[in-house]
Image (tube, grey):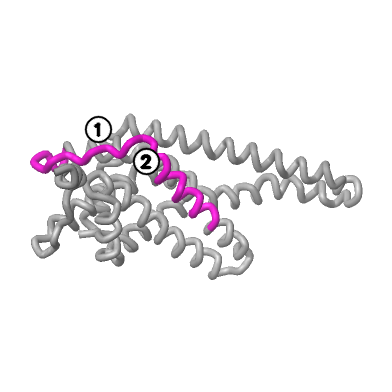
């Protein structure tokens, strides 16, 4: 189930139907990374100037270029999952519509989340991911543990975020939470695939589109299990409540 979803998502990322969305996603991701880079560089310069460290300790000048280069590059790697969360929240409905239409034409289509709600989803997970990855960054100089903590934390966070965004097109929030809990192992494994992609330079720019397509497929397969009691669709639930 998961392997089939991974290969299906990998094929679709570069498909003509998703190509325009992919380029827009990459463009937004790069723009956000550049903004973060400029912001961190500015903060670094202000710190050195405000504390007069360069004048007091001239050797700091020698390290400044290193810290502003490699050091900030490492920080960006740890911040990429949070940036991916924002981009995913913005583009997931576009990706889901294409995948659902092309691969599941006989199924009722999902309903796009309101822009405000999808933005809140993205910002909520981005904030949580930011806190977790900043904590993981503190372990950067502990070999073995640093990558392990980064990978496990992001496998959980990215799996949870992408699945909730994909399933939220069909189910009420409480039903989405129940589905995610009942299939926590599969969702975590899917999140691990996305987290592994984050670790690959350049390729990690496609993370939002790949993760979105992966979870759309996974959600479809999980909710098609004959033995799985399905929750009410979001639109049906609203109708029943009004009645």
Q: Secondary structure at mark 2?
A: helix
Magenta-drawn stretch contains 110: yes
Magenta residues? 102-131
* Dot 1 crowding, Cα within 10 Å, few <14, some 14–19, many 20+: some
Direction front: furthest residue: 243
Q: Is residue 202 left or right of residue 64?
A: left
Magenta stretch prevailing secondary structure: helix
Q: Which residue is mark 1?
A: 17
Q: Residue at x 32, y 45 (%)?
A: 212
Q: Which residue is mark 2?
A: 118
Magenta-drawn stretch contains 204: no
Q: Position of residue 200 (x, y in %)?
A: 45, 52
Q: Quarter of the image for the C terminus: give it.
A: top left
Q: Position of residue 106 (x, y in %)?
A: 8, 41
Quadrant in the rendering for residue 103:
top left
Where is 32 relative to 153, above or below?
above
Quadrant in the rendering for residue 17:
top left
Q: Is residue 202 left or right of residue 193?
A: right
Q: Quarter of the image for the N terminus: give it.
A: bottom left
Q: Residue at x 23, y 37 (%)?
A: 97
């Amino acid at each position: 189930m998961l392997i089939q979803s991974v290969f299906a998502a990998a094929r679709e990322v570069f498909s003509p139907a998703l190509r325009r969305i992919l380029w827009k996603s990459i463009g937004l991701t790069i723009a956000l990374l550049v903004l973060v880079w400029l912001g961190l560089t500015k903060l670094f310069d202000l710190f050195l100037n405000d504390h007069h460290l360069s004048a007091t300790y001239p050797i700091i000048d020698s390290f400044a270029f290193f810290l502003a280069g490699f050091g900030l590059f490492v920080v960006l790697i740890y911040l990429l999952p949070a940036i991916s969360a924002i981009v995913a929240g913005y583009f997931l409905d576009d990706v889901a519509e294409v995948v659902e239409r092309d691969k599941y034409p006989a199924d009722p289509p999902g309903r796009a989340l309101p822009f405000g709600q999808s933005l809140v989803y993205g910002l909520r997970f981005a904030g949580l991911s930011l806190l977790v990855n900043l904590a993981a960054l503190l372990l950067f100089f502990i070999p073995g543990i640093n990558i392990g903590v980064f990978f496990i934390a992001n496998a959980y966070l990215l799996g949870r975020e992408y699945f909730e965004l994909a399933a939220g097109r069909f189910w009420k929030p409480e039903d989405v939470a129940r589905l995610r809990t009942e299939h926590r192992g599969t969702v975590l494994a899917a999140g691990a695939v996305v987290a592994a992609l984050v670790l690959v330079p350049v390729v990690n720019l496609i993370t939002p589109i790949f993760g979105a397509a992966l979870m759309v497929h996974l959600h479809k397969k999980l909710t098609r299990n004959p033995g799985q009691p399905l929750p009410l669709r979001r639109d049906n639930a609203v109708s029943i409540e009004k009645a």
